[in-house]
Amino acid sequence: MPVDFTKHFVAVPTEFKLMNNTGCSWKVTMKLMNDRVTLDQGWATYAAVHQIKIGYMVTFKLFTPDTLKVIIFDDDGIEVVNKCGKHDEAFAAKD
């Protein structure tokens, strides 16, 4: 996430919930690196569980101050719908 995007926050959260198109939530931590805010702990597992591959496009929309809505498109531009599978309990967001 470009640092300029962070101007939309009163304070950039150190943790976000990622919510997919079926309403499942996943928590990830954020880290400042090379003038960008990056997804850190939890992201690699999220990407693996949701089978995000090279060539896929992932969009993030600020849904609430600590939640990003995530939409994944495959390499043909078709939205990927992932049902909630078995999440790593360390990162599954509790509502």
Image (cartoon, rainbow, N blue to C red):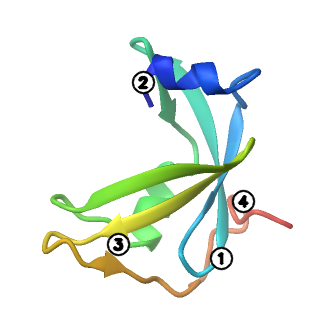
Q: Where is residue 76 drawn, in percent x and y?
A: 13, 74
The residue carrying mark 2 is: 2
What's the CA distance linking mark 4 and mark 1? 18 Å
Q: Where is residue 70 drawn, in percent x and y?
A: 50, 60
The residue carrying mark 3 is: 51
Q: Please state, as top left, top right, bottom left or bottom right, where the C terminus lies in the image.
A: bottom right
The residue carrying mark 1 is: 23
Q: Is residue 45 above or below residue 31?
A: below
When asked about the image quadrant of residue 56, the answer is bottom left
Which residue is nearer to you in this view: 45 or 1?
1
What's the CA distance linking mark 2 and mark 4? 27 Å
Residue type at numbered disc 2:
Pro
The secondary structure type at the circle numbered 1 is: loop
Q: Where is residue 46 drawn, in percent x and y?
A: 50, 61
**CB under 8 Å between callouts 3 and 2?**
no
Mark before the other along the chain sequence, 4 or 1: 1
| Mark 3 Cα-neighbour bin, 10 Å: few <14, some 14–19, many ≥20 | some
Q: Please state, as top left, top right, bottom left or bottom right, where the N terminus lies in the image.
A: top left
The secondary structure type at the circle numbered 4 is: loop
The residue carrying mark 4 is: 90
Mark before the other along the chain sequence, 2 or 4: 2
Residue at horizontal 71 percent and vertical 31 percent from the top: 14
Please state the total of marks drawn on the protein image. 4
